[in-house]
Image (cartoon, rainbow, N blue to C red):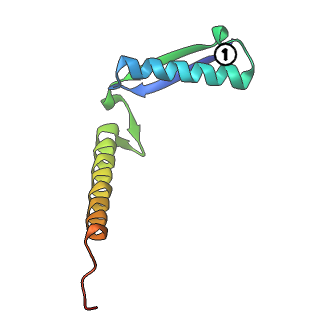
Amino acid sequence: MPIVHVDLVEGRSPERVETMIRAVSQAMATSLEVPIANVRVVVNEMAPHQFGVGGRPWAEVAAERRRQAHEVHEAREVDESHEAQPAQGGQ
């Protein structure tokens, strides 16, 4: 009987966690060739202050990732706005 332990930082909806449980269960059943009824998934959720990455608290890492994603999004919008403008110049 395969048992999978998944540790997550709190914040996901119950529906999202249930979707993950279904997907992990199916992946284990398929890859190990066992009945899905035999697969167990244990989810442990922790508060953000109980987790760190690279010696930094999760809140700090997550804030940096959000900032970087926002910068990439803004850069794409600028690129797209330049591409949408007609070329200027003499003919």
Quadrant of res 87: bottom left
Check the image and name the residue furthest to the bottom: 90
Few, some or many C-alpha atoms within 10 Å of disc 1 (few <14, some 14-19, many ≥20)? few
The correct choice, above or below, for 52 with respect to 43 in the image is below
**Image: 64 above or below 84:** above
Q: Which residue is mark 1?
A: 2
Q: Quadrant of the N terminus?
A: top right
Residue toward you, 25 or 89 = 89
What's the amino acid at mark 1? Pro
The image position of residue 43, as x and y in percent, is 47, 18
Residue shown at 26%/58% (left/top)? 74
Quarter where residue 4 is shown: top right
Determine the residue positioned at 47% across, 21% down: 19
Q: Quadrant of the C terminus?
A: bottom left
Judge whether 22 appears above or below 89 on screen.
above
Direction top: furthest residue: 37
Image label count: 1
Q: Secondary structure at mark 1?
A: loop
Residue at the right extreme of this rendering: 33
How far across and down, in percent of the image, does residue 77 sit?
A: 27, 59
Q: Position of residue 39 (x, y in %)?
A: 63, 13
